[in-house]
Amino acid sequence: MFKVAGIALSCVLVASVAGAAWVYWHLNHNIKSVDIDSALGDNRPARAVTTPTGPESATPLPSGALNILVLGSDSRSGKRNKALGGGSSEGARSDTAMIVHVDEGRSEATVVSIPRDTLVTRPSCPLESGGSTAEAYGVMFNSAYSLGGPVCAVKTVETLTNVRMDHYIEIDFSGFADLVDALGGVTVTTDDDISDEDSHLELDAGTHHLDGADALALARTRHGIGDGSDLGRIGLQQKLVKGLLDQVSSSNLLTNPTRLYSVADALTGSLTMDTGLNSLTELMSLGQSLKSLSSTYTETVTMPVVPAPSNPNRVVAQEPEAGKLWESLK
């Protein structure tokens, strides 16, 4: 989800609390992961080549372009997720999907939102229990996660874009709220009044500093703005992306060890990642390579779409515009 745009810089800060062995152990054991590479094998788009940077005496940091699939899950597990809007006790959907593309040099980024109402071809996906799902045409994008979890979500995105996802990061409702609270909230400016009975959010147009619960409600709001479609909600989520980056930059976490630890604890405890990011060492390396990234040099866009011929309440990728966008991410 959008909140992961702030993760990159937060990862850098984990290094300063990792000196104590018990802290390192705790944070490292917070991390949950899924082995997407092994599940999908080699039948995937080519991986971008990364190049080291920095002095020879230092551990070289990767500097090549990077694509990270970020999913926000409306998980129903746990009392807090239910209280925050997760619904029934079973299942989860990919409530929000973004591809975070970091350019060569890792000082600029593009965040591409994929509307969950997009109709796509869902490829055959391997299942953890064995066997595989059937290929399906013209189905909702978020059905991939519901049916086959992170592995199928990644494969569906790669099928849609023909772009290799280098990493996968997932966060649920309570994890996002905890991360925003640990950062001290997030400031966003809304252009219109918001009144949404579903997300329970009431906001006048203007600038607001939101706590975790209200930031989550803003991210989930769709019926209280515009035409009530997912496209309006994406606009709010993109504001939160930049707000979180600004909050990380302005928080001076290195001078506040208590808040720094809270952020690191919320960060590592709220995410599910691919096995390429399943240790503090790997997270710190990624974060250090992204330390120059800021909201000023982060562009937010939405996959070009048009109404689906089969259903005006759904959308499909608009070509050739969508294809040109995906090509720019390679």
Image (cartoon, grey):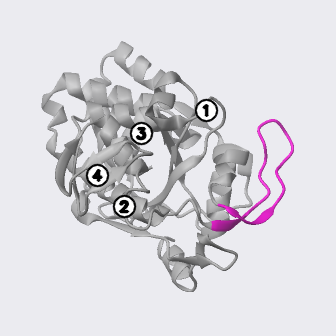
> Depth-wise, is mark 4 or mark 1 nearer the camera?
1
Say which label, 4 or 1, has the lower sequence index.
Answer: 4
Amino acid tagged 2: Ile
Look at the numbered discs 2 and 3 and tell me whether their residues touch, using CB distance below 8 Å. Answer: no
Residue of label 2:
225
Say which label, 1 or 3, has the lower sequence index.
Answer: 1
Picture coordinates of residue 160, whole percent (x, y): 64, 68
Give the residue drawn at x 51%, y 71%: 330
Look at the numbered discs 1 and 2 and tell me whether their residues touch, using CB distance below 8 Å. Answer: no
Amino acid tagged 3: Leu
Disc 1 crowd, CA 10 A, few/some/many (<14, 14-19, 20+): few
Residue of label 1:
88
Reply yes or no: does residue 182 show up in magenta: no
Give the residue drawn at x 79%, y 62%: 136
Q: What label does residue 283 carry, if any? A: 3
Could you say which quadrant of the image residue 103 lies in? Answer: bottom left
Picture coordinates of residue 239, whole percent (x, y): 30, 58
- Cα–Cα gap, marks 1 and 3: 33 Å
SS at circle 4: loop
Judged from this view, the residue extending furthest toward the top is: 22
The magenta stretch is 119-140
Look at the numbered discs 3 and 4 and tell me whether their residues touch, using CB distance below 8 Å. Answer: no
Say which label, 2 or 4, has the lower sequence index.
Answer: 4
Residue of label 4:
55
Look at the numbered discs 2 and 4 and tell me whether their residues touch, using CB distance below 8 Å. Answer: no
Say which label, 3 or 4, has the lower sequence index.
Answer: 4
Give the residue drawn at x 29%, y 46%: 202
